[in-house]
Amino acid sequence: MRLVPWKPDDLARRLDDVVAVYGEAMGYRPELMEARRGIIATHVRRSGFRAVATLTTEGQLAGFGYGYVSGAGQWWHDQVRSALSEEHRKRWLTDCFEVVELHVRPAAQGHGVGARQLRALLGMAPGATTLLSTPEADEQKSRAWRLYRSFGFVDVLRHFRFPGDERAFAVLGRDLPLAAPSGE
């Protein structure tokens, strides 16, 4: 497998594959994916958009991740902002890169694909901080949680509920830039 940076048009060209990986990784029903397709298509035009993809030797999409500069007027940003104290708003949202999606097909999970994608994405990220949200889970059992903690993400909000989703989420953050791994 190889990790490649993606420009907005690269992701847009592979939108069907991106939506399929997203649905598989999140366990969502296919009918929910159509709405996601439109949302993802608008994200590629956001300021500071950065994306990475992991491709198999046959060129199939094994995983992807993307984000952009978080700002007022964006749904996620505004939801999180409303739940933070003024101090935390200044700390986390003033110059923030939002990791919007980071997914790996279930068959490719457990092989470091997510970690390579996250490292590459954060290495390209503009901003002083980065935030992401992830469903609440047992931190010891969840691969996503172990990944985020290994990258130094800390709790910003816990047990947060976004409108339209019955699940509780955690909002996690860390400072940027991302330090180079040991030995580099």
Image (cartoon, rainbow, N blue to C red):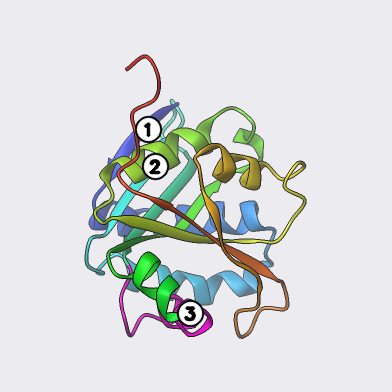
User: What percent of the width, then of the height, locates residue 12?
Assistant: 32, 60
Q: Residue at (49%, 82%) from the top-left corner? A: 79
Disc 1 crowd, CA 10 A, few/some/many (<14, 14-19, 20+): some
Residues in magenta, as a range: 70-84
Disc 3 crowd, CA 10 A, few/some/many (<14, 14-19, 20+): few
Q: SS at mark 1?
A: strand
Q: CA distance from mark 2 to mark 3?
A: 35 Å
Q: Nearer the viewer, residue 8 or 70?
A: 70
Residue marked by disc 3:
85
> Quarter-wise, where is residue 2 in the image?
top left
Disc marking residue 53: 2
Q: Quadrant of the C terminus?
A: top left
State yes or no: residue 76 in magenta: yes
Secondary structure mostly seen in magenta is: helix
Confirm or deny contact between disc 1 and disc 2 (CB under 8 A): yes
Disc marking residue 55: none
Q: Residue at (47%, 52%) from the top-left corner? A: 17
User: What percent of the width, then of the height, locates residue 54?
Assistant: 43, 37
User: What percent of the width, then of the height, locates residue 36?
Assistant: 50, 71
User: With respect to residue 144, does 180 lie above or below?
Assistant: above
Residue marked by disc 1:
3
Q: CA distance from mark 3 to mark 1?
A: 38 Å
In the displayed structure image, the side of residue 17 where residue 178 appears, left or right: left
